[in-house]
Amino acid sequence: MAGIAGTPGTPRVLRAMNDRAALDLLLEHGPLSRTRTGKLTGLSKPTASQLLARLEAAGLVLATGTTEGRPGPGAQLYAVNPAAAYAGALDVNPYRIRAAVADVTGRTVGHHELPTPGRRPALPVVQQVTEALDGAVKAAGLTRADIHRTVIGTPGAFDPNTGRLRYASHLPGWHSPTLLDELAAALPMPCEYENDVNLAALAEQRLGAARGHGDFVLLWNQEGLGAALVLGGRLHRGFTGGAGEVGFLPVPGTPLVRQVTKANSGGFQELAGAQAIPRLARELGVEDIPDGPYAEVAAALLERAAARPGEEPHRALLHTYATRLATGLASLVSVLDPALVVLSGTVLTAGGEPLRDLVQAELAELAASRPRLVLAGVREHPVLRGALESALATTRDEVFDTSRRSEGHRV
């Protein structure tokens, strides 16, 4: 079987395949008995017993108790050992770094948030990253050496051809050509980097509204406006990692923005980004506009409008903003023809079903393709959750591969 060392069909390879199948079932169903493990895997009870004993000896499963409520002695239950491995994740934006650690079952065991205000960071980026990660590691009662792998989510994307961060000039300190080498030297575990909106899409694909969908678009609006594209079940990143940077998309209704990377903006961002909503609300006569960061103000305004969709000027704000969103979305769905569009980020989810309904209706008139629009299912720290899911997927592939253990590989 591809991805497992050895000759396909040999007993060692078949054991490793069965081991992984059993571990995945334990993750999905929770504690299982030998009999139940055998039924779910298609193995005989003696073979399932040998498998669980082997995984217990390897430190991958634990005996956790017995079944109750049945006549006779309870059957022994087994579960994945949470301490078999740990994964780390960081969600970076210009204002803070949010870090978390999860055990191999996916349970978050440590969390830390490091404020990073200002155009000039008080701490070098490497120190910011290590301090944020160490805070989460300490909260989990672990050390850096316990973390098997870490995934870091940032705005923009690291160009695979140059190693430099692109499409995120608003993230101070992250543009050094040597940054990735410096981080690799400072962190003892393998570290991967991914666009923050892509990670939000991964969270939706694994845990949220996009489960079971191989082709979907996630539209994100928080500190910036962006999209993630999942095609054939996989993230589409583009040649430089910039696929989905739809904030730069020229759209009707705004002046044509030139030299967009220097401006760090574009037509769709100017039309429908968070910063456009307070301006639009003032133009429409909305009163009591709060102060604060654009994303928080925009979310508050849309949440209030969604609670009063029949009242003017809240009705006008929802309708006008829905048209603006649909204007940019029409270009995306006309090219990609996805089955599903997920609206994510605090600004879009604040508008709730009233905003979603309006965008769906507007999009039906602006694009020939008719994807279904849904609100994001993962609302709490979706970027961080996606980063954990990404780190855990690779960690499990490595730690659960018992064929590598049998050959003496360090996993």
Image (tube, rainbow, N blue to C red):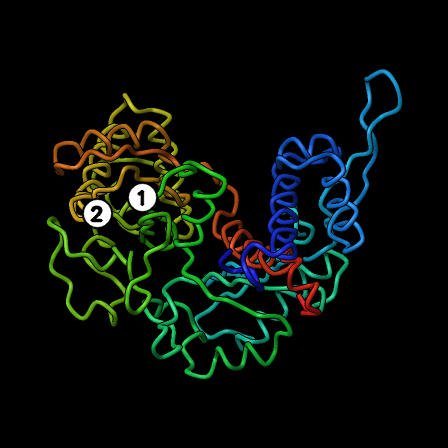
On screen, residue 56 above or below 351: below
View extreme (right): residue = 73
Task: Please tell me which residue is depicted at 80% across the width and 26% down the height of the picture.
Answer: 67
On screen, residue 134 above or below 34: below
Q: Which of 370 and 97 is in front in this view?
A: 370
View extreme (top): residue = 71
Q: Nearer the viewer, residue 317 or 322?
A: 322
Tally the marks. 2
Amino acid marked by disc 2 = Leu
Amino acid marked by disc 1 = Asp
Q: Earlier in the sequence, mark 2 or mark 1?
A: 1
Say if residue 274 shows up in the picture: no
Query: Pointer 2: what residue?
Result: 336
Contact (CB < 8 A) between labels 2 and 1? yes
Q: Nearer the viewer, residue 387 or 284?
A: 387
On screen, residue 245 above or below 159: above
Q: In this view, does 408 lie to the left or right of 163?
A: right
Q: Gap in Å between the C-alphas at discs 2 and 1?
A: 9 Å
Q: Where does the image place residue 114, in percent across and percent down from the top left? A: 59, 62
Q: In this view, does 282 lie to the left or right of 185?
A: left
Q: Which image quadrant is residue 311 in?
A: top left
Q: Where does the image place residue 216, in percent across and percent down from the top left? A: 32, 43
Task: Please tell me which residue is depicted at 25% across the width and 28% down the height of the picture.
Answer: 315
Query: Pointer 1: what residue?
Result: 215
Say if residue 13 shows up in the picture: yes
Q: Is mark 1 on a helix, strand or loop?
A: loop
Q: What element carries label 2?
A: helix
Circle 2 crowding by C-alpha within 10 Å: few under 14, some 14–19, many from 20: some
